[in-house]
Amino acid sequence: MSAAAALRAKFPLLVANPGLHYFDSAATAQMHRSALDAVVAHETGARANVLRGSYRLAEAADRAYEAARQSAARFLNAAADEIVFTGGTTAALNLVAQSFGCLLEPGDRVVISQAEHHSNFVPWQMLRERRGVELALIPVLPDGTLDLASLARVIDDRTRLVAVTQCSNVTGARTDVAAIVAAARRVGARVLLDGAQAVQHGPQDVQALDVDFYAFSGHKCFGPGGVGVLWGRAELLAAMPPFLGGGGMIGAVTEEGYTWAEPPRRFEAGTPPIAQAVGLGAALDWMMGLDWAPIHARESALCAALIDGLRRIPHVRLLGPEPSSARAPIVSFDIAGLHPHDICQVLDAQGLALRGGHHCAQPLLAALGVEACTRASLALYNDEADVAALPAGIVRAIGVLK
Ligand code: PLP
């Protein structure tokens, strides 16, 4: 059995759909059996609310939830009390924009890039409206990579936060995080990394990355939907006021007012996504046990083969940088005269699942000169058969649609 086939066998949806060529892991990766099993085991063996009950079932739920926090901490090489469970990357980014954002003053600058997903774009535009902060953009070059030559100009001494994606969900371009961190540190700014597209390619080390905040979603790293993680440095979380008020996040409440709990509970108001967090913990534990070097080599080879296959098709314009280790296996393309939605529909009829549209990155697409594009994203369970099927499917789609 090939390495990809062995991995694929652990994904129940792929096992149930042997003819499916799944190319949309950048939107949602398939769920690993260990995550699914952990959710079922939790819901059938330890379902209770957390941090509220003192009966044994509730204590079992507490233990499972906190064990998931420990797994997330190990996955990021961080301390468990710096891990906040959220509803996903979007919720994590909004939390920072609200809670860290309210420590900013009018005239302070937040820097993002033109390559951001809307969830790392709109919360900062909303903060600009709310607090009068200035929002500046690191531009992209024609291949979609960040223009590092602009950093000294864009990240100026009014900059308090630089919030960028670790990897573009459209072009697969990986950000030169060290260059961003160096430019931010020169002016004393904090750095937030949107890790949504990085986490499905292996554990991360926030200490080595030397950032201050890190956000990701469970459904993009083989875990359940509806859960995500915000990691923040302890001293930053401690200085930030809560975003949502409610049960679980308080010290005490009187008719006159309330006090806050310490982080991370300060930021987990209400009943959290408990079973989802437990499932995420299982997915992360599984990922931490993998040997990633051969997986990365295979993903890169498949990405290069896919690009090569697509390049041979007339009318296909590829977006993004050349294949290299600085590119995640995400390949977006435009076919002159055809709408991505039509292309995706014809591909779907052939068992090829791709996403077409603006990919929640309209400013990036505008910079690249397209309104919409078709995206193929690969994960560790894709194989040579997938990569061979796609160019052939596109040739057929062009034949049907042109
Ligand atoms: N950031 C990036 C780079 C993404 O690709 C996505 C989702 O595609 C998000 C943020 C938002 O993630 P979620 O919808 O899970 O909150």
Image: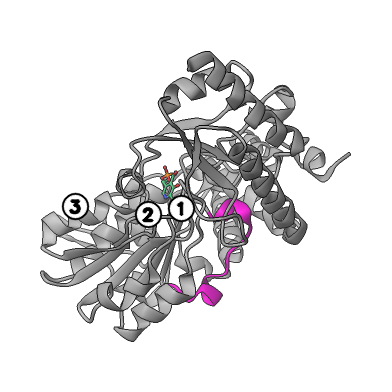
**Closer-to-camera residue (290/349):** 349
- Asked if disc 1 is less than 8 Å from ligand 1, the answer is yes
Q: Circle 1 — which element?
A: loop
In the image, what residue occupies the spot 60% across and 55% down? Answer: 323
The crowd level at tag 2 (other Cα within 10 Å; few <14, some 14-19, many 20+) is many
Give the label on residue 168, or none: 1
Q: Which residue is mark 3?
A: 126
Pinpoint residue 21: horizontal percent, then vertical percent.
Answer: 66, 29
| Distance from the alpha carbon under mark 2 to that under mark 3 | 18 Å
Q: Which residues are magenta?
A: 198-211
> Which residue: 70% across, 38% down?
33
Q: Which of the marked residues, 2 or 3, is nearer the chain's N terminus?
A: 2
15 is higher (above) or lower (below) than 235: above
Q: Quadrant of the N terminus?
A: top right
Element marked by disc 2 = loop
Q: How is the image coloured?
A: one colour
* Residue 321 numbered tag: none
Instruction: Kindly tell me whether residue 241 is visible in this rendering.
Output: no
Percent across and percent down for residue 108 are: 17, 72
Looking at the image, tell me whether mark 2 or mark 1 is earlier in sequence order.
2
**In the figure, residue 294 lies in which quadrant?**
bottom right
